[in-house]
Image: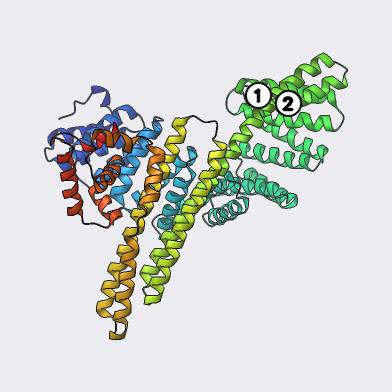
Amino acid sequence: MLIAFSTSLMGSTKSDSLISLVKQTHELNQKANLLYELSVSLFAENPDTSLIIAYEALDLSKGMQNALSAKIHKLIGDISVNADSVQRAVSEYKYAKDIFEKLDGEKKSLLETYVSLGNIYIQRDNLPEALDIYNKAVMLSRQGVDTVLLPRLYNNLGIINLYINNTEKALELYSKALDLFKKRKDTINIAGTTTNIGSIYVELGNYEIARSYYNDGLEIFKSINLMEGEAHALLKLGMLESKITNYARALEHFDESINIQKSLGITYSGIKSIFLAETLIYKGIAQFKLGHPEKAYINLKHGYNIASESGDIGLLAQASEYISKCFKLKSDYKQALEYHEVYKKFSDSINNQSSIRKLTQLEMKLQYEGKLHDNQMENQAQLRIEQKNTLYSILAASVFLLGMALFIVLLKLEKNKKNKARLAQQNLEEKLEHTNKELTTYVMYLLRKNEFIISISEKLKQAKLEAKAENKQRITDLIKELEENSKMFSWEEFELRFQQVYTSFYKNLNEKYPKLSQNEIRLCAFAKLNMTTKEIAAITYQSVNSISVARYRLRKKMGLSSDENLYSLLSEL
């Protein structure tokens, strides 16, 4: 298939040159590379056309697991993010990641792909995946692949920890980011991170330290004449002074911030208006606290009107509460009651959102900790294998890793019990999906455990060849013990979990195929989970050939023709 280029693409010297080369080139890999370069050149000005050309390049490189194929997938991911097609972007970035990870000379592209994926995960509150991908990016950056990204990665990891209320860890990561920004003399990020650290100290109750960081951030913003940053830092200082009831000083900061915002042309509509509304409302509250309800009402009402445009219920609740108090002082009880009712409505909404957010944070924290344990387990395993100092170090690693794996499973089981209590009012379909995920997690844990034990066993067999004679018998015993451990599989626990998800599967299967043996019924259960022959062999510790023969006999017994799919048949039971 040859793409037809629109005349609207003409005009750019580089684009014209690339289009001409594409038409003249017949070798597939060269044509795919030229189309990729053309797509990159058009990305900024014509993303729709850029996407079409990128797909054309991908078609030509189909089947190639090389750097060009990975770069095309990454480019489609970038274009998709630009078009807000997040699901497609994630899929393309994953394709690119899988290919880049197999290539030695594309570490920088791999790092960029990690960061792009991590940014999407963090925006979608998928914190465990974001944590995993950012940690991989940090490892690459530390290896010197692209150290410029390192402080930004620390910053994003800080965001994850702040979201799950791990404030001290967030502070540690922000501090690392700040140190690196200072080394690179990245003034804008120095100022922004400094101000963010100040907000963390406010949460920790260390107000003097917070004030110091806010003032430092303010001075840096002034030195680079970034007025929006100045206004933001002044608002933070005003909020801090209000928190410690120093309302007169708070008013000075709020007035400075408002004057800067007005000089920047911030109006009463648009995204930036929320910033102005927040400043006006906090100024009004400070004036009310100082005994100036008339002045307070003017600023509170301005802030309320602006917040109404954006629908920010948090600001509307704050403003309506104090507007109600202003009317009450004037003995205008009708107006006071009206605004109090507005405050109550928004306050209830905030409380509901807060409860949902806390539940989400708790769930994310448990997932985050589970991912953290996974990472620790993986790092420890790699460290133990690389060191290979003694037989005891290998054994200690296996025990530690198995213990960690068991701990993670228990943690998830405990989390699931709590989730069931919280999610009691959710529908049956959600419960089924949750239990299905738990079953999949359990099966994948067994697979990974067996694969890990088999890997350790193989390494011990290699070590046995070079071991001293007096150690060989001990190594043989360890190999035997590991292999016996990998054969352990609790059918009772598996079938209990399986029947919780597929309650009528065994009954329907027996009614339709009453002559199936117990082993064939179990094979059907694995097939129902869409497990491959290799995965079934690993979990049951049988050869792939044995499972293939068993599947063949099962299909024959069930009367399936060669073009009928076993999984599709079992999915209907």
Would residue 235 be found to the left or right of residue 359 on screen?
right
Mark 1 crowdedness (10 Å alpha carbons): few <14, some 14-19, many ≥20: many
Residue 69 location (% of width, % of height): 24, 43
Instruction: Examine the rendered structure and indicate whether residue 314 appears above or below residue 460.
Output: above
Q: Residue at x 49, y 57 (%)?
A: 407
Quadrant occupied by the C terminus: top left
- The reply to whether residue 277 is in sight is no
What amino acid does circle 2 point to? Ala
Q: Residue at x 50, y 39 (%)?
A: 125
Mark 2 crowdedness (10 Å alpha carbons): few <14, some 14-19, many ≥20: many
Labelled disc at residue 319: 2
Residue 5 location (% of width, % of height): 21, 26
CB under 8 Å between callouts 2 and 1? Answer: yes
Q: Could you say which is closer to the camera, residue 41 or residue 404?
A: 404
Residue beneath disc 1: 307
Query: The residue tagged with tag 2: helix, strand or loop?
Result: helix
Query: The residue tagged with tag 1: helix, strand or loop?
Result: helix
Q: Could you say which is closer to the camera, residue 521 or residue 139?
A: 521
Would residue 143 be found to the left or right of residue 343 on screen?
left
Q: Could you say which is closer to the camera, residue 572 or residue 137?
A: 572
Instruction: Examine the rendered structure and indicate whether residue 197 appears above or below residue 335.
Output: below
Q: Residue at x 29, y 84 (%)?
A: 468
Q: CA distance from mark 2 to mark 1?
A: 9 Å
Residue 211 location (% of width, % of height): 72, 48
Q: Residue at x 70, y 31 (%)?
A: 279
- The reply to whether residue 49 is in sight is yes
